[in-house]
Image (tube, grey):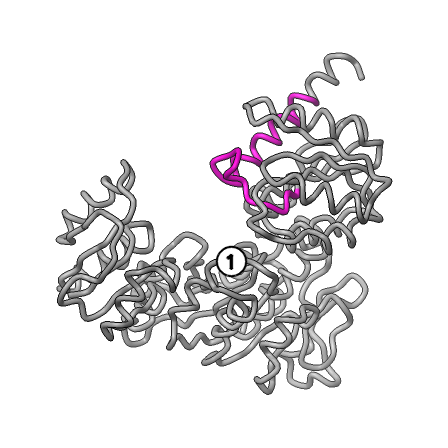
Amino acid sequence: MICVLGAGVSGAAAARLLAARGERVVVLEGRDGERQRAAAAELAAAGVEVRFGEPAAVPEGASLVVATGWPPHHPVLVAAAEAGVEVIGEVELAWRLRPEGAAPWLALTGTNGKTTVVRMLTSMLSAAGHRALAVGNVGVPVVEAVAGPYDVLAVELSSFQLHRAPSIAPLAAAVLNVAPDHLDWHGSMEEYARAKGEIFARAGTVVHNADDEWAARLAAPYPGAVGFTLQVPRPGQLGVVEDLLVDRAFVADPVREAAELASLEDVRPFAPHNVANALAAAALARAYGVPPEAVRQGLRDFVPDPHRIAHVARVDGVDYVDDSKATNPHAAAASLAAYPSVVWVAGGQLKGADVDDLVRQAAPRLRGAVLLGADREPIRRALARHAENVPVVEVADRDTGAMDRVVAEAARLASPGDTVLLAPAAASLDMFTGYPARGEAFARAVHRLETRREGSGG
């Protein structure tokens, strides 16, 4: 019997696949709500037993546990280890169950930018004529695609997934960046980084962000690792020369030769960290043999996901930008660096993250700050220390009109040429159902402001 922990998207997909292969499967689900009951009914129809309640031990007779996101210190996983029952993740299960001749994997991980890069990569692969699919942490479970009609899979992997994927061997693998995140799950920054670095262990080609200290450190043990940089590339790297994205790694003579891949104008939305995303995607695509013209076309065809440095409107000469996806300080720092003069909208659930370095680096470009959400105080204190002349407004409201007040205060602080930037550096669940809902509330408030200004003739 195989035990699957969790009836969410990945757990349910793993359970269905195992049941279809004739295995007896028991799913343990700690939450008992309407969504979980609906999932259980679907799994029951597939011959899968679902048991509700917070588990403390694996079911008797379990020979394997498939865990999807459960932390290592959870009692059921501790009990599995004590009982000598192997624990793997859904990604590892997918790798083990690949049929002969299965599509190779181009895998990537990072604290920020994963979904953007995996979608850029898929666009490049498609532009080259390959049947490609983005899977993994992007939303489509890998187990649902391994036997599909694809030439290649673009696989986005979180640190949780890599923690339990001891044998995956992607054709090429990339680490985009590593900054403190999920430390409550992993226990330390070193363990979090180690989990990220597992993506390189059996990769055919190692790709890393040469401008990121942790990513470069993780790639250092691998001879021939390919770097990407926002600087002029050295041999063995991809980088930027004037307004061009250039490859000096996947060419016949990296010392004397370079391939032009695209221009900065092909990267949308344009921001330095998004150029790095494009270079990472291009490196993985080139490792698979995608020609330069398909890299360029893939970038041009790429449609960014919502709430990632998305321009909402220009009102009275002020640009309003939604980067609600910037849910940690590292992502917010990249977003703030893209604009020279910013009224910053920040706050939410910091999850213990430190914002001092973020505020210190951003201080010269801040024209004002509007703070909302549960953890306003640490951001306010950091602003007082490192940006004492920047006006700060706190909006303590939690009701449905809170974002209108946030946008109104930001508009009052902004001058023509400024950017009002929602880059919260924090999670959103203190006030919203998720970062998309927060971004949508911001966009609606901006559009209401725009309508009022147009109606008043201002």
Residue positioned 61% across, 41% down in the render? 375
Q: What span is in magenta?
A: 423-449
Q: Quadrant of residue 215?
A: bottom right
Q: Is residue 86 left or right of residue 339?
A: left
Question: What residue type is disc 1 on?
Answer: His
Q: Label 1: how many residues lie within 10 Å, few (<14), some (14-19) or many (20+)? A: some
Q: Is residue 426 magenta?
A: yes
Q: Residue at x 28, y 38 (%)?
A: 33
- Please identify the quarter of the rendering in which residue 22 is found: bottom left
Query: Is the residue 298 above or below the residue 196 in the image?
Result: above
Q: Is residue 112 above or below residue 84?
A: above
Image spot of residue 29 (x, y percent): 26, 50
Out of 410 and 83, give the one closest to the viewer. Answer: 83
> Which quadrant of the figure contains the C terminus?
top right
Can residue 288 be seen in this snapshot? no
- Image x and y of residue 427, in percent: 55, 44
Question: Which residue in the protein does label 1 denote?
Answer: 182
Left or right? Give the position of 42 relative to 275: left
**Horizontally, is 415 left or right of 320 in the view?**
right
Vertical arrangement, residue 316 with respect to residue 10, above or below = above
